[in-house]
Amino acid sequence: MRPLLLLCGAFALPALAQPPLDLTAVEARSVPDLELGDELRLLADARLLSASTRTLGREGPTLSVEAGPRRAEGMTTGDLAAGFELPIRLDGGPARLAATALDGATALEAAARLEARARLRAAYAEAWLAGERARLLDEQARLGEEWLRLTRRRIEAGAAAPFEAALVEGDLLRTHAERNRAREGLAAAWAALRARADLPAAAVPLA
C-alpha cells in the first residue's frame, strides 16, 4: 500500500503546476460561432430595410422654383415655374414588413446566441469528461507498470509464481489500449472545444 500511495502522490504533482481552466474562463475566450452567420446576416438585412424606410418616412415636403427665359414662336418671355413635392410616407406594407423582419431577426439572433452558448458548454463538458478519462487511464497504466515490476521482483525472490507476471501483463496491455482510445477521444473533444474558444493547441486541465 505504501508504494501505491507514493505513486499516486507523484501523479498529483504535475496537476498542481497549472491551475485548471473553469467554464467562466473558457466562455471569456469564446470565438464567434460560425453557425450564427445566417442569423446575423438576416438581422443586418432587416435593420437595413428598417432604416431605409424610416429615412424615407422622415422626408418632408419640398418646394422647387425654376425661372428663366422661355421661347415660343419666335418670341421670348419670362417664365416662373413652381413645383411642390410631397413624398409618400411608407407607413404601410414596406414599413410593417421591415418592422416584422427586424423583430423576427432579433428574436432569432437571441435564440441563436443562447444555442451557441449551449454548444460551447456542451463542448466544455465533453472535453472535461474526456480529460478525466484519459487522466485516470494514465494513472491506471502507470500503476499497472509498477505492479508488473513488483511482481517480477517477487518472482525473482521466489515469492510468486511465474504465471502471475503474465496475468499482470495481460491487464496492462488492455489498459494501454483503453488509454490510447481515451487519448484519441480527448484530442477530438479538445479540438471541438478549441473551435469555439481561443485555447492552447494542447489540452490543458479543465475544472
Image: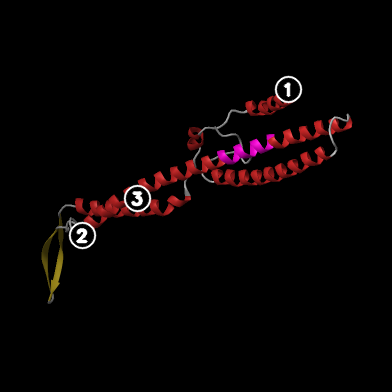
Would you identify the image quadrant in which residue 142 lies?
A: top right
User: Gap in Å between the C-alphas at discs 1 and 2?
Assistant: 82 Å
The secondary structure making up most of the magenta span is helix
Q: Residue at 47% across / 45% down in the picture?
A: 119
Q: Earlier along the polypeptide chain: callout 1 or callout 2?
A: 1
Q: Residue at 11% across / 62% down in the picture?
A: 80
Q: Residue at 62% across / 28% down in the picture?
A: 18
Within 10 Å of disc 3 (Cα), the crowding (few <14, some 14-19, many 20+) is: some
Magenta residues span: 128-139
Q: Check disc 2 and report the residue beneath it.
A: 93
In this rendering, does residue 52 appear at all?
no
Q: Is 200 on the left-hand or right-hand side of 94?
A: right
Of the residues shown, which amino acid type is indicated by label 2? Gly
Q: Check disc 3 and report the residue beneath it.
A: 108
Q: Please state which of residues 52 and 125 is positioned toward the viewer in this rendering.
A: 125
* x then y, percent, for residue 90: 19, 57
Of the residues shown, which amino acid type is indicated by label 1? Arg
Q: Check disc 1 and report the residue beneath it.
A: 2
Query: Given this view, does label 1 or label 2 mark the residue nearer the observer?
Result: 1
Q: Is 153 on the left-hand or right-hand side of 125?
A: right
Q: Please state which of residues 152 and 111 is positioned toward the viewer in this rendering.
A: 152
Q: Earlier along the polypeptide chain: callout 1 or callout 3?
A: 1
User: Gap in Å between the C-alphas at discs 1 and 3?
Assistant: 60 Å
